[in-house]
């Protein structure tokens, strides 16, 4: 049997993941002098509320020892760990290091999803379905990589300073967001390890229309999943949904709060739009 594991970039708590047929290692966030395992010990709304009280957050990847312990829970299974994007977090490298601490590391494959949040969630859910159908580890990896190639992500930050402090920006664009009234639209670099400016518009609605055009050029339509995730900004998420649903009526939509660890990077008020083809 192939056991699927991941991390909480999938926006699953450990209990929710168990109920869905896989396992996750939680990322941690620190705020107000206290550390929490995201989803298990603090919700996205609670985390945003603490930021709004004036606390500055930080995040950290799952501890290598904790990931190794997770692997050891399934000593008789092959394991496929689909992690969030390398470069945007050290989670992938930590998962690889953890495999080296186990007695039989050859039974573990660590796959860099090259994405996070919505598409990461989709990839893991799909891998669980394939494992249940009896596919081999190599077959699941091959099918997952096909879908990874279709992913496209955009982020509209409300406070550019969070991305700058987190070091997720390419140096050339690190101060674009300071220009008054301009709304930068971020996307991943080709190697998926940093964020760059895909475009700049005035206002949120114009930004979403820019994203809609980019997704049209990407081929989005029937058979695609569109994830709209937000950091304490449900009204903006619904506004984005209205524009994108009109543009892509045959796509499947999900609107969800972002994970606390990603809010640490994107900042409160940010909205992400991400797509993956099924």
Image (spheres, grey):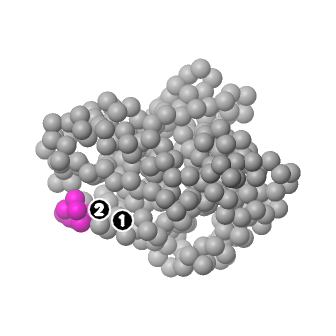
Q: Is residue 131 left or right of residue 113?
A: left
Q: Assess disc 2: are there few (<14), some (14-19) or many (≥20) residues with their C-alpha within 10 Å of its C-alpha.
A: some
137 inside magenta stretch:
yes
Quick one: quadrant of the C terminus?
bottom left
Q: Which mark is residue 3?
A: none
Q: Which residue is mark 2?
A: 141
Relative vertical location of residue 45 with respect to residue 33 in this rendering, above or below: below
**For numbered disc 2, what is the local secondary structure?**
helix
Residue 264 appears anywhere in the view = yes
Relative vertical location of residue 231 with respect to residue 190 in this rendering, above or below: above
The one of 174 and 28 positioned closer to us in this rendering: 174
**For numbered disc 1, what is the local secondary structure?**
helix
Q: Position of residue 100 (x, y in %)?
A: 24, 38
Quick one: quadrant of the N terminus?
bottom left
The segment highlighted magenta reads 134-141
Q: Which residue is mark 1?
A: 145
Q: Position of residue 42 (x, y in %)?
A: 53, 33
Name the image quarter holding residue 63. top left
Q: Position of residue 273 (x, y in %)?
A: 60, 61
Q: Is residue 268 left or right of residue 261?
A: right
Secondary structure mostly seen in magenta is helix
Residue 14 appears anywhere in the view = no
Q: Position of residue 255 (x, y in %)?
A: 58, 58
**Residue occupying image coordinates x 60% and y 54%:** 195
**Residue occupying image coordinates x 49% and y 66%:** 151
């Amino acid at each position: 049997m192939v056991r699927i594991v991941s991390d909480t970039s999938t926006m699953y708590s450990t209990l929710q993941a168990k109920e869905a047929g896989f396992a996750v290692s939680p990322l941690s966030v620190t705020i107000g002098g206290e550390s929490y395992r995201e989803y298990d010990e603090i919700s996205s709304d609670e985390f945003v509320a603490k930021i709004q009280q004036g606390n500055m957050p930080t995040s950290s990847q799952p501890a290598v020892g904790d990931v190794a312990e997770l692997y050891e829970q399934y000593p008789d299974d092959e394991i496929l760990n689909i992690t969030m994007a390398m470069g945007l977090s050290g989670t992938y490298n930590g998962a690889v290091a953890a495999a080296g601490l186990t007695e039989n590391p050859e039974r573990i494959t660590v796959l860099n999803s090259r994405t996070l949040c919505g598409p990461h969630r989709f990839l893991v859910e799909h891998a669980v379905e394939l494992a249940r159908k009896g596919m081999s580890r190599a077959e699941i990896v091959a099918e997952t990589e096909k879908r990874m190639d279709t992913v496209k992500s955009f982020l509209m930050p409300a406070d550019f300073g969070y991305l700058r402090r987190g070091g997720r920006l390419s140096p050339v664009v690190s101060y674009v967001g300071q220009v008054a009234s301009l709304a930068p639209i971020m996307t991943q670099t080709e190697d998926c390890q940093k964020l760059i400016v895909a475009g700049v518009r005035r206002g949120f609605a114009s930004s979403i229309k820019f994203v809609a055009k980019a997704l049209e050029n990407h081929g989005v339509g029937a058979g695609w999943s569109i994830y709209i995730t937000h950091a304490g900004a449900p009204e903006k998420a619904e506004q984005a949904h209205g524009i994108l649903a009109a543009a892509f009526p045959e796509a499947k939509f999900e609107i969800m709060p972002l994970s606390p660890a990603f809010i640490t990077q994107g900042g409160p008020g940010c909205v992400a739009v991400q797509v993956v083809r099924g």
